Image (cartoon, rainbow, N blue to C red):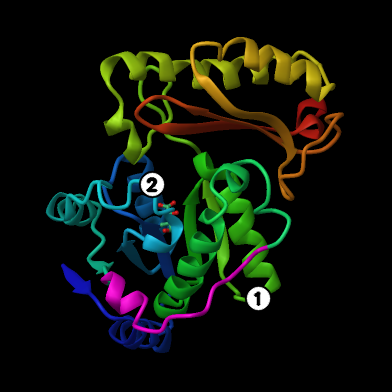
Amino acid sequence: MKIIQTPEAMRVWSDEQRRQGHSIGFAPTMGALHEGHLSLIRAAARENDVAVASIFVNPAQFAPTEDYDQYPRPFDDDIAKIEAEHVHTVYAPTAADMYAEGYATYVHVEKVSQGLCGASRPHFFRGVATVVAKLFNAVKPHRAYFGQKDAQQCAVIRRMVRDLDMGVEIVEMPIVREPDGLAMSSRNEYLTAEDREKALCLSRAVRCGETVLRNGERNARVVIDAVRDLMREVTVDYVEVVDAETMAPVEIVERPVTLVVAAFLPTARLIDNIKFDPGEQQT
Ligand code: PAF
């Protein structure tokens, strides 16, 4: 396993791969890897000549009140899981490697990062966009793989890549769920048994919303009300039907949308979503 720590060393490796004509697939992570992450790493390895996974718990995307210090960091286990996927290059910079003394540059993606998670975590997407831009500059991937569970994050990154002419293909991979439907998340390990049981209402609620949409309902308010009804056990942060690209709320479903939900449990804040394309359903 080759563990690369500095942006300079990462760029040297990537430049050499590109010089040899190899396509580079990249799966950025914050570690604490579960099947969701492994699906990204597998796709990066399958669809490219070489693949890189990164492990970096990014301080810039945590508010001072959030769980940066507690965030799980099972580094050796993560390395073993990546190696088991036959990916042999990991980029694992330290916070000091990424944000040197005097660091002052941030990427702010307007509009798409406002609202939803951006409303309850105002610092979050600035931190994500900044670190992903920095990771792309070091890894120089042809394709980068992100999970659909973080639908707004995917939309923010796609917008940033287009706006800043980064030339990286963004591949969004489907949500990976536990057998009982809970969307996989590194933060699920914070849940008590009681909270985990309650958390199941998120996946039940988005499945219900999907059924309502598939049955022909096009009024977003009706869908939202049906979904909220199933989330009474948790403190809802938001339930919205949004344009799949801009993440702006829609009233009538006439183009691809994402039904997004977020809820606070005593031990974690969780998100889930489903995508729905009315055009696809008609064909
Ligand atoms: O989705 C994540 O794990 C993180 O937000 C990411 C994209 C690795 C940036 O830190």
The percent coordinates of residue 132 (x first, y second) are: 48, 66
Considering every residue shown, the one lying at the far left of the view is: 76
Q: Reading the chain from its start, which is encountered first: label 2 or label 1? A: 2
Asked whether disc 2 touches disc 1, contact meaning CB atoms under 8 Å apart, the reply is no
Between 52 and 132, the residue placed more toward the observer is 132
Q: Quadrant of the N terminus?
A: bottom left
Residue 256 is left or right of residue 137, and the answer is right
Q: Which secondary structure lies at badge 2?
A: loop
Would you name the residue on which mark 2 appears? 66
Q: Is residue 118 above or below residue 253?
A: below
202 part of magenta stretch? no
- Could you tell me if residue 214 is visible in this image? no
108 part of magenta stretch? yes
> Which residue corresponds to the image point at 54% horizontal and 64% vertical from the top-left?
129
Q: Is residue 4 above or below residue 241?
A: below
Query: What range is drawn magenta here?
Result: 94-109
- Could you tell me if residue 42 is visible in this image? yes
> Which residue corresponds to the image point at 26% horizontal and 67% vertical from the top-left?
90
Q: Is residue 18 above or below residue 43?
A: below
Residue 99 is left or right of residue 168, and the answer is left
Task: Give amino acid for label 1.
Answer: Leu
Considering every residue shown, the one lying at the far front of the view is: 65
Would you name the residue on which mark 1 appears? 164
